[in-house]
Image (cartoon, helix red, strand yellow):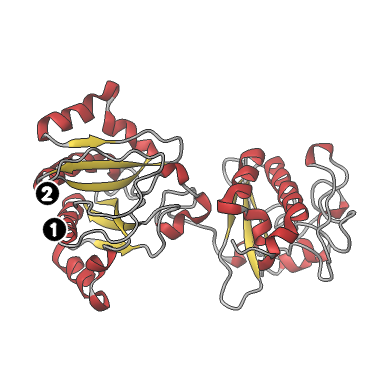
Amino acid sequence: MKRFSDGNMGGPYKRSRMGPDDIEVRLLIPSKVAGSIIGKGGKNISRLRSDYKASVTVPDCPGPERILTVCSPEVETIIKVINEVVPNLEDTSGRSKTGDDVDIRMLVHQSQAGCIIGKGGLKVKELREKTGARIKIYTNCCPDSTDRVVQITGRGNTCTDCIQEMVELLKTVPVKGVDNQYDPINFDDLYAEEYGGYGQGSGGGGGGRGMMGGRDMGGPPIGGRDMGGRDMGGRDMGRGGRPAPFGGPNARGVGMGGPPPRGGGGFGSGGGGGGGGFGGGGSRNGFGMMQENGQTEAQVTIPIDLAGAIIGKAGARIRKIRLESGAGITIEKPLPGATDRIITITGLPNQIKMAQYLLQQSVHENTNVARNHRY
C-alpha cells in the first residue's frame, strides 16, 4: 500500500525505492528460507524482478528473521510474486508433511490494522469466511517499530487470496502518525511470540507446570549440596507442582557460589544471605526431563519485581546470558494474580548450570535497578 506518512524515515533499515504509484507489501520471513527465495548468485530473485517488473528485496540480517518486500503499481503483480515464494514458506509452517498449510506473516502499520479488523471484528470475520484463511492480528508492535504482524494460515492459494483482499483494503487507508518500519536487526527472542516474530519458542512450549512431576524427581543435585535444599527442587518439585523458587522461603537475597567450571560451591547458599539460589529441577540428575539429544530442561521461579534484573533494557541481559551459557532460556509472563514468573532453561547439564550461575549473578548485580524500572 502507498506509504503516505508524516513520520520519521530514520533507522538503519533501508526502505525499498518506490515510484509514486507503487504499492508495497512486506512479509516477515524466517532467515532460513531467504536463500531459497534469493537463489544461487541471486538467480531466483533476479528472475522474479525480470518476469514481473517488480521490486523484490530480501535485505540481509544476522538474526532469525528477515523482511521480503515486493513493490509494484499492480496488486495482481505483487500476488503473483508472493505465489512464487509460497513453496519456500511451506517448509516452515510446521505442517510440511501434510503439504497443505502455509504460514505467511504480513507487516502492516499500526494505524492501518483497524481496517482489517473492522468494527467489533466484523471485517476480519468476513475475510475469514470469504477466503477460508485463518487470520491472527498481533496486538503488540514489532520491536522499535510501528508495524504489527498479520498472520495468515491456510493453503497457499487461500493465503494469497486473503493477502490480496487485505491489500485492497489497505490501499484505502493512508498511514497515520509516525511510520517506523520494522528492522529485523531489532529482533527480540524474549517477546517474539507476543508480536508474531520467529523466535526460538515459536510453535511450542513446555508441557505446563506439572511436566516435571513424579515422586522421585527431587534427588541430589549436581555441583554440591547448596544448589537447592528441600524447597529448591526436592520434595516440592516431586509433587509436580510449581517450579523451584528463586530463593528460599525467607530469602533476603540471592546466594551466589563460584562459577560452574570450578565446581564445589553450588549455586544456592553463599554470601548473598539467607536462602538458596536457583533450584535444581526434576529428575535424579538435578535437572528436568532428558531429551533424545542429551539436553535437559530445568524450571525455576523468580519474583516479578526481580525479572527486570535478568531481562535488562530491551532484553539485553537475557540475550547476553543465552549467548554466554549456550542454553535456551525463556521467561514466561506472570499469570493473573501471580507474584512470580517461571524461567525455563534448556540445554546440556553444563549449559544449564552456567545459565543458572549467570542468572543469579545478574540478579545479584542488578536487583536495585530492576525494582525501580519495569521491563
Disc 2, SS: helix
**Quadrant location of the C terminus?**
bottom right
Query: Which circle marks residue 168 in the picture?
Result: 1
Residue 317 in the image: state x and y as whole percent.
Answer: 63, 48
State the residue lying farthest toward the top.
41
SS class, disc 1: helix
What residue do we see at 70% from left, 65% from top? Answer: 371
Q: Are marks 2 and 1 in contact (CB under 8 Å)?
A: yes
The residue lying toward the viewer, choosing from 239 and 39, is: 39
Q: Which residue is mark 2?
A: 75
Residue 129 lies in what quarter of the image? bottom left
Question: Looking at the image, which is closer to me, 371 or 86?
Answer: 371
Three-letter amino acid code at the position of disc 2? Val
Residue found at x 68% / y 64%: 372
Name the kind of residue labelled 1 in the image.
Answer: Glu
> Considering only vertical position in the picture, is 370 above or below 346?
below
In this rendering, is residue 83 above or below 145? Answer: above
Residue at coordinates 46% horizontally, 45% vertically from top-left?
A: 186
Q: Front-most of 135 and 291?
A: 135
The residue under the point 14% across, 66% down is 130
Quadrant hosting residue 213:
bottom right
Cα gap from disc 2 to disc 1, whole angstroms: 8 Å
